[in-house]
Amino acid sequence: MTGKSDPVRAAFHRQYEACEKLGSPFTARLCRLAGQRLHPGGAVADAILGWQGDASALGDSVPLRLCGALHALVMAGKSEALAALYPPHHADISDEDLWGAVAAALKEHEAFILDRLTGPPQTNEVRRVGATLPMFLEVTRQTGLPLVLSEVGASAGLNLHPDHYHVDLGGLSRGPESSKVHLAPKWPGRAAPDVPLSIAGRAGCDLLPIDPGNPADRDRMLSFIWADQADRLSRTRAALDIAAASDVRVEKADAIDWLARRTAEPINGAAHVIYSTIAWQYIPESARAKGEEIIRAAGARATQDAPLAWARMEIDGKTPGTGLTLILWPSGKEHLVGRADFHGRWVDWHGWPE
């Protein structure tokens, strides 16, 4: 047990640092306290400290599984003691009082928390539309065609509806002003492509899709949003309402099988855009290689009347944030077109080299 606890504690510490940087001091505090104060002896602590697998954010995200379980208890009204210390009541709470309430919840709600630890976090961060939309506009600029969107790891499908949100890309606005979802990432880079957006079709896949119209699915997803980010919670609720009102539902499917079916035939008269946002890394390495092979083979079949694009907002090992990479066929040209914050708070748009 002890030997396995060190990487787990390190995962909590790294998540604490990440939450601090991403403006979530309360969730950072939870991660710090859990990393320091979880000790063997209880069922939940034993499950966490003896985790079989990669507990880090690049693996099973165990810290965020625990934070999501605790937040779910608060949201459902199952722990008044925790709710009394959670946002917005957390400013003057001591570490001892907060951890005391957490420790009590770990015992009182042991079965619930153990069950929640078995599933991965899903937040479907809608602000990432600020990073994918300029890539979609670039594809439109170069092809002059409407788009068909295919999202890998789409979760609840919130990022499949960029045309239903009002998005300000550094002064360039797209989408209805009446939308309940307004996005305005900081925009230090070049101007985004100034072209109209037309979406002719959209679909997504996920191993664990969320139905935005199902109350239990909604509550589970919202519980993984950090409790001290009230704006993020309200924005996601509004995006869930928009997705629930549409006829699009994310398909439960293996990404590689789904990509093979989605790319089996070129889509004449439209530009087919395959994309993902911080999802590709969670596909096993061998499957990622197969997925790339499928996409590039489809690219080789693309024509001017049926172009294919691969747009990625994925971790590339560089800083700051994450890379925005775009490939467009039939030319096959590939460029790093920008960088973005993981949660879409800022987008540094480089554009497509001319």
Image (spheres, helix red, strand yellow):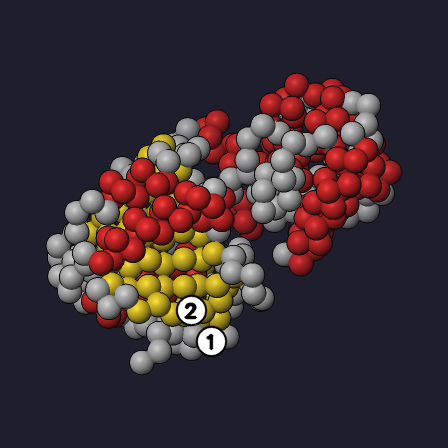
Seen in the picture, residue 199 relative to 253 is either above or below; the reply is below
Q: Is residue 185 visible?
A: no
Cα gap from disc 2 to disc 1, whole angstroms: 13 Å
Residue in the foreground of this view, choosing between 338 and 302: 302
Number of marks drawn: 2
Residue in the foreground of this view, choosing between 46 and 198: 46
Mark 1, residues whose alpha carbon is within 10 Å: few (<14), some, or many (≥20)?
Answer: some
The amino acid pointed to by label 2 is Leu
| Residue at x 30% of width, y 73% of height | 194
Q: Position of residue 183 (x, y in %)?
A: 45, 59
Per the image, label 2 sits on a secondary structure element best described as strand
Q: Which residue is mark 2?
A: 336
Seen in the picture, residue 241 relative to 214 is either above or below; the reply is below
Q: Quadrant of the C terminus?
A: bottom left
| Residue at x 33% of width, y 63% of height | 327
Q: Is residue 5 visible?
A: yes
Q: Which residue is mark 1?
A: 189
Seen in the picture, residue 194 relative to 4 is either above or below; the reply is below
Residue in the foreground of this view, choosing between 57 and 147: 57
Q: Is residue 307 left or right of residue 114?
A: left
Q: Position of residue 128 (x, y in %)?
A: 45, 55
Say which mark, if any, is on residue 131: none
Q: Position of residue 352 (x, y in %)?
A: 35, 74
| Residue at x 81% of width, y 27% of height | 40
The amino acid pointed to by label 1 is Gly
| Residue at x 44% of width, y 33% of height | 208
Of label 2 and label 1, which has the lower sequence position? Answer: 1
